Image (cartoon, rainbow, N blue to C red):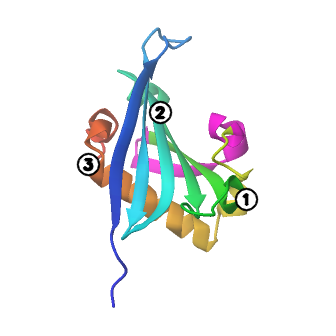
């Protein structure tokens, strides 16, 4: 039996700003990652419009149990930073405690980089980011030069 594919549901978007350092708007999109009938994570992606090469993007994930009987204590925040580098596009797990998601009512605990690296949660987080990358067409500005 093969595991069910992650499916992305786009649920919202908002422009904020302008950015203090460049004057451009900050774009935030969010949605849910589902595996079959179960929600696996909520996600938030944020970047400065017109300045992805300079600023990159932030991927904040809220991973855990959702639905009836689930509470924020059943979920953790995991954050990844995206950058275009001379070696190509790269993601790096960063401390979620430094991100706004850390204080969200959706999250029981914001994980630091060391809590995630070399764990099954890291594999899960990267799989969720892959699904977002491939399925959320609102990220075209972020993904366009990442071939």
Q: Which residue lies furthest to the bottom in this view?
A: 1
Depth check: give the residue in front, 43 or 73.
Answer: 73
Q: Which residue lies furthest to the front in this view?
A: 68
Give the residue displayed 63% in from the left and 47% down from the top.
106
Circle number at residue 138:
none
Check if residue 94 falls in the magenta segment: yes
- The magenta region covers 84-103
Depth check: give the residue in front, 98 or 90.
Answer: 98
Position of 104 relative to 119 (above/below): above
Give the residue displayed 26% in from the left and 48% down from the top.
147
Q: Residues within 10 Å of mark 3 (few under 14, many from 20)?
A: few
Where does residue 2 sit, x and y in percent of width and height?
33, 85
* Residue at numbered disc 2: 46
Q: How crowded is mark 1: few (under 14 residues within 10 Å), some or many (20 or more)?
A: few
* Residue at numbered disc 1: 114
Quadrant in which the N terminus is drawn: bottom left
Check if residue 89 falls in the magenta segment: yes
Position of 86 relative to 23 (above/below): below
Q: What element carries label 1?
A: helix
* Residue at numbered disc 3: 147
Where does residue 109 sit, x and y in percent of width and height?
74, 52
């Amino acid at each position: 039996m093969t595991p069910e594919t992650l499916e992305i549901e786009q649920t919202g978007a908002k422009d904020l700003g302008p950015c203090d350092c460049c004057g451009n708007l900050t774009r935030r999109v969010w949605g849910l990652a589902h595996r079959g009938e179960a929600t696996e994570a909520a996600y938030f992606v944020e970047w400065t419009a017109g300045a992805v090469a300079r600023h990159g993007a932030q991927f904040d994930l809220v991973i855990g149990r959702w639905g009836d009987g689930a509470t924020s204590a059943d979920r953790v925040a995991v954050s990844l930073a995206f950058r275009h580098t001379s070696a190509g596009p790269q993601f790096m797990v960063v401390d979620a405690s430094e991100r706004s998601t850390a204080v969200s009512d959706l999250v029981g605990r914001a994980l630091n980089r060391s809590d995630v690296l070399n764990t099954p949660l890291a594999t899960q987080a990267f799989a969720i980011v892959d699904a977002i990358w491939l399925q959320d067409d609102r990220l075209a500005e972020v993904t366009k030069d990442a071939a």
